[in-house]
Amino acid sequence: MLTKEMNDLLTKTGPGTPMGELMRQYWMPAALSSELPEPDCPPVRVKLLGENLVAFRDTEGRIGLLEEFCAHRGASLFLGRNEECGLRCVYHGWKYDLDGRCVDMPNEPAESQFKDKIHLKAYPTLELGDVVWAYMGLKEKMAPSPPAFEWTTVSKQHRCVSKTWQECNWLQALEGGIDTTHGAFLHRAISTETNRVGINPQDMRVRHPVPQQEIELTNYGFLYVSIRSLGEKGTFFRTYHYALPIYQFWAIVNDSRSSASNMWVPMDDENCMVYSLMYRHGGGPFSAEEKVEFDRRNGRDRLTADFRKIRNKDNAWMIDRQAQRRETFTGIEGINLQDHAVQESMGPIVDRTREHLVASDKAIVTARHLLIHAVKKMEQKEDPPNIWPSAGHIRAIHRTIPAGIHWRDALKNEASGTASALD
């Protein structure tokens, strides 16, 4: 249970808020590279940390991220013409380069120098792993290293990336992601004959719904482990990572060559954009069938043009009560949609003064403490935890090991370097 003041501190991310200022000291996902497929293509709107922005790829292929509204009369630059290394407002022709400088003002006399006084807010960007990243903090504080997670370094054929608009605060979405016990209930298939996506009733996670949990603090956040005893068959463990402030990494059960990650990016205090990805760190690239399954799991075929879910809170996520009775625990189609539905059902910002946490909420409590501690360090003029030096070593795995072997000893034998974050 949190006080209202602590809940506000953790959930509000707009300009000038403590959590918003903390997040501005990290590289944040702003768009998919595929949204800006070629030079001079149409610009796209970006809502990020409570700010209305517009992104565009200029004639030389560089990406600019500017405040959305023209400095002249406030028209949206989303309507603008992307041409000749700049974005031109269609109202009166004012043109801005990717640094936000006004480089042309055709409705002023030729001798006027007024354009030299006009400058829109602009943020540095980089492209990595099919994602456009933005840095919105003080430039002198900008992280020297890019967010080079392992998934950003593999080939495009070894990576799948998508994003979905979630209509609730970023923190309740993230807390749903790092909750390790809900899958055995929320995502369960209750029939072996259904073809709907869900955890098979015979899966060990269903038969052992409450695993033992252990948490190891790291320099980027924490590693947490769910452990299930399989009797004579040994012990199954699955690792997860939480990296401040918005990143989670998890192991894909039944595929030891692949891992997955989510990033919960605040759009404003009542909406977030969830970036979901899967990548292969061993073996060949993903097959066409595996990519189709990724799209199905993430609902990419059921999104509007602005990445909002067709099955959403306005239509009760199209819950199928007959399917709930006979096929799946929820009657809601798709793993990600099940997560979104329960998290959005809490309201735009859940009232944490009314919650009652239990032992299985250990990871959620730890994440809150780390976020609050990071904000306090920032307010004391200290740098927040720097996750990037360890970024390439973060990999989530799962293994079945002989009884009596500790998961930490098994993890140290991994070639991925994951264990280095624990030492």
Image: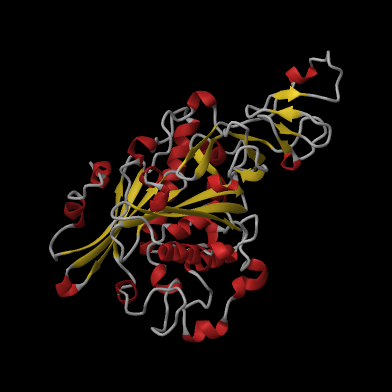
Q: Position of residue 106 (x, y in %)?
A: 82, 25
Residue 11 at least partly seen: no
Q: Residue furthest top?
A: 111
- The answer to whether residue 193 is above or below residue 358 is below
Query: On the rendered structure, is 419 left or right of 133?
Result: left
Query: Which quadrant of the structure image shows residue 226?
Result: bottom left
Question: Looking at the rendering, in which quadrant would you find the C terminus?
Answer: top left
Residue 419 at least partly seen: yes
Q: Position of residue 356 (x, y in %)?
A: 46, 64
Q: Position of residue 39 (x, y in %)?
A: 61, 37
- How many marks on residues? 0
The residue depicted at 31 percent of the width and 63 percent of the height is 255
Query: On the rendered structure, is 66 left or right of 30?
Result: right
Check the image and tell me how it is coloured.
secondary structure
- Nearer-the-camera pick, 189 or 244: 189
Q: Position of residue 389 (x, y in %)?
A: 34, 35
Query: On the rendered structure, is 395 left or right of 183?
Result: left
The residue depicted at 57 percent of the width and 33 percent of the height is 62
- Nearer-the-camera pick, 336 or 64: 64
The residue depicted at 84 percent of the width and 32 percent of the height is 92
- Nearer-the-camera pick, 416 or 378: 416
